Amino acid sequence: MARSQLLEQTCKSALNRVPHQSRLSFRWTVNPYRGCSHSCHYCFARAYHTYLDLGVGEDFSTKIIVKTNVAEMLRRELAAPRWTGETVAMGTATDPYQHCEGRYRLTRKVLQALVDFENPLSLLTKSTLVYRDLDLFAELDRRTSVSLGMSVGTLNESVRRLIEPGTPPGRKRVEILSRFAQAGLSTSVLIAPIMPGLTDAEDELEPLVAACAAAGIRAVSGVVLHIRPAIRPHFFPWLKRTYPQLDPLYTKLYASRSYAPRSYQEQIAARLQMLRQRHGIELIASRLGNRVHTAGARKELPRPGTQLTLLQA
Ligand code: SF4
């Protein structure tokens, strides 16, 4: 993989408001970086790089915008009288624990600000670097509410290396998440994306669901691949080069739409439900078993039936 260029910038605000029409279950996000060195070929956030006059291909994974003052701006916004302490989400458009976080530690600074202001957090990542910050997650959990999701698409290493070459192995991610579960934190795995003809078979999904159950992870949900129009010029040529045998299937499924047909999605949802029941794991992470928090901002539980379906990381 090509070496990343880290483009340092200052931001005018840290909190981004999620558009009302969005399917996400929270209204505010923080992203210390733009672009992502995990280089997942299916990533819908590639499209956001075009807003910076950068490309959706190699530019997305090698030209990383670093918001050097994000934690300072966040502290200012959390201290404002109009801020009501709503849950902040991270991992919505870029992985907060991608490679350069090891150097900049911006996500850690954001976490420290959330701890200091006792503000709830929901974070999704694909990176094992998150383990570095277990102390802050535990402190935030004591003071208010935090949930950690790990996005894992497959345990099949030969597939993982091709579809998301900058990520750590799926088994390692599950193992790291299990340490958060052991610490009593709310944990979940998002199987994402489930790729038709590649990672969607029962014998591909079952080892992952079983590994999550064995690791003590509270919940597993899944989301089928969607291909937004802006990333098609990157995704389809990559698919043709990498898995030419899948090209006819994907052309049929996604010919004139971003989402796979409803019948296919229902088939996958039923398969996952059957696997969850077989392995005794929930759909949504609940806080049962964790102590009730009384300090800090209002505690918000996931709404029944909601999934983190549009998070990326
Ligand atoms: S899917 Fe997540 S981890 Fe992968 S490139 Fe996109 S933002 Fe990064």
Image (cartoon, helix red, strand yellow):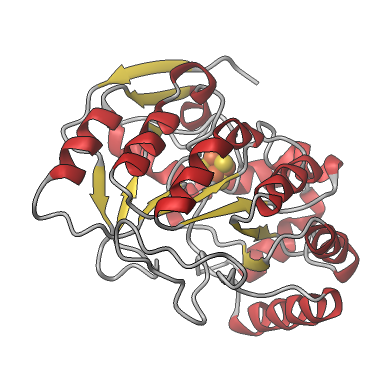
**Vertical placement of 205 versus 54: above or below?**
below
Q: Quarter of the image holding residue 145?
A: bottom left
Residue 227 located left or right of residue 15: right
Write the residue at 50% across / 33% down.
36
Total labels drawn: 0
Please give left or right for residue 245 compared with residue 168 in the image.
right
Task: Compare residues 302 and 251 and report the one nearer the observer.
Answer: 302
Q: Position of residue 246 (x, y in %)?
A: 77, 57
Residue 234 image position (x, y, % from top left): 54, 42
Residue 159 left/right relative to 129? right
The structure residue drawn at horizontal position 49% and vertical position 75%, both measured from the top left corner, is: 306
Q: Residue at x 68, y 54 (%)?
A: 181
Please identify the quadrant where the N terminus is shown: top right
Name above or below for residue 193 compared with residue 115.
Answer: below
The x and y percentages for residue 282 are: 68, 75
Q: Residue furthest right?
A: 203
**Direction from residue 169 to residue 236 in the image, left or right:** left
Ligand 1 rendered quadrant: top right
**293 vs 35, nearest the viewer:** 293
On screen, residue 97 above or below 115: above
Question: 211 or 42, which is in the foreground?
Answer: 211
Tell me where residue 201 sits by quadrant.
bottom right
Give the x, y percent position of residue 146.
47, 55
Seen as rendered, the residue at the extreme left is: 81
Residue 234 showing in the rendered view: no
Q: Residue at x 57, y 67 (%)?
A: 255
Say above or below: 269 vs 49: below
Q: Is residue 289 visible?
A: yes
